[in-house]
Image (cartoon, rainbow, N blue to C red):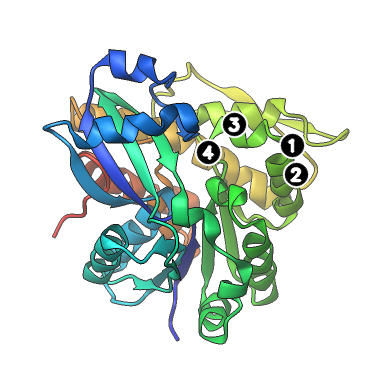
Amino acid sequence: MAINLLGMGNPLLDISSEVEPAMVEKYGLKMGDAVLAEEKHQPLFDEMVKLPSVQYIAGGATQNSIRVAQWMLQSSGATAYMGCIGNDANGNKMKEACAADGVKTAYMIDSSTPTGCCAVLINHPERSLCTNLNAANNFKVEHLKQPENWAICEAAKVIYSAGFFITVCPDAMRAACAEAAKHDGLYCLNLSAPFLMMVPPFKAVFVELMPQVDFLFGNETEAQTWADSGNSGHSKTYKIEPIGGENMAGGGGSFQCGPYYGPYNHHCAVKAWHDEWDLWNVVRRWAQGAVLSSDRAAGETNRNFPRCGVELCRPQPRRNCVLVFVPDGCQLPR
């Protein structure tokens, strides 16, 4: 089995539309942020589906990353994805989207719960995400350990999860991370959202996984939240210089991390963070008016397959951003 990349995460159907700022404020949301839906957010989904501009797009941060990586590789079955969906029309739409993209899926099916969805409120040039996990919340490590699925995990050269998956199945992340270490694979993790590092049980999983994380991704706010959260009594601060162009944050800065990062790890985490700002600039220059996605792990993760130097393969994520994230949602060129 030749699997370059395995992703595990929360498969969601994006319900996406342009909205007025009043709708964002009505539900206590913020542009550029991502939250899990609470009871107060439930009417939002009904409002979204009634909007004339609504679109339905296969989504979920990790699933989108795998779809983009598959598109880059142009070799059917080179990537795989696991998550939990319902036995319904929305779940079938995602199966069809991944099959069309060439991604091998090993979904866990929960017939008692609907497929997860994400309200994507767009107010150019930003968006706000509100997620109803539904079936995505029910993934179990036992599904990963089924022989046919575990064989995928063993074969993968790179395993990737967004931090959002910590809220669902940290045991699956622990098992996959340990397996990657066994067969000299790469384990990659995305911080995903500041709130994850503010909730003690979720933060504890980050702290546990970090010693084995080869590449850590996050935008400026997420990186700062991780730095400010205090990872141990022996944290260090590393100087960061702008990489490859103007830095929107205004020049160099510092990134604080605990002793868990080896030199290779925190070096790449720093570079990934500053590439984020470089990518934002590229998208803004080349696609004025596009909606800016805060999840750009697809290009970052995929560029590491050849294990070549970071400096040599930085241009590829930029290209991905322009081609993939300029349309609303993650829609791949054909």
- The answer to whether mark 4 and mark 3 are in CB contact below 8 A is no
Circle 4 residue: 218
Mark 4: which amino acid? Gly
Give the mark nearer the N terminus: 3 vs 1: 3
Q: Residue at x 38, y 72 (%)?
A: 105
* Residue 332 visible, this orientation: yes
Q: Is residue 250 left or right of residue 120?
A: right
- The answer to whether mark 4 and mark 1 are in CB contact below 8 A is no
x, y percentage for residue 6? 48, 68
Circle 1 residue: 200
Question: Dot 2: few (<14), some (14–19), or many (≥20) neighbours within 10 Å?
Answer: some
User: Which of the pair 305/18 is nearer the observer?
Assistant: 18
* Residue 10 visible, this orientation: no
Give the mark nearer the N terminus: 4 vs 3: 3
x, y percentage for residue 58? 28, 53
- The answer to whether mark 1 and mark 2 are in CB contact below 8 A is yes
Mark in the foreground, 2 or 4: 2
Q: Is residue 205 left or right of residue 300?
A: right
- The answer to whether mark 2 and mark 3 are in CB contact below 8 A is no
- Where residue 240 sits, quadrant-wise, is top right
Secondary structure, mark 4, is loop
Q: CA distance from mark 4 to mark 3?
A: 13 Å
Return the mark for residue 204.
Answer: 2
Give the mark nearer the N terminus: 2 vs 3: 3
Mark 3: which amino acid? Phe
Mark 2: which amino acid? Ala
- Where residue 109 sits, quadrant-wise, is bottom left
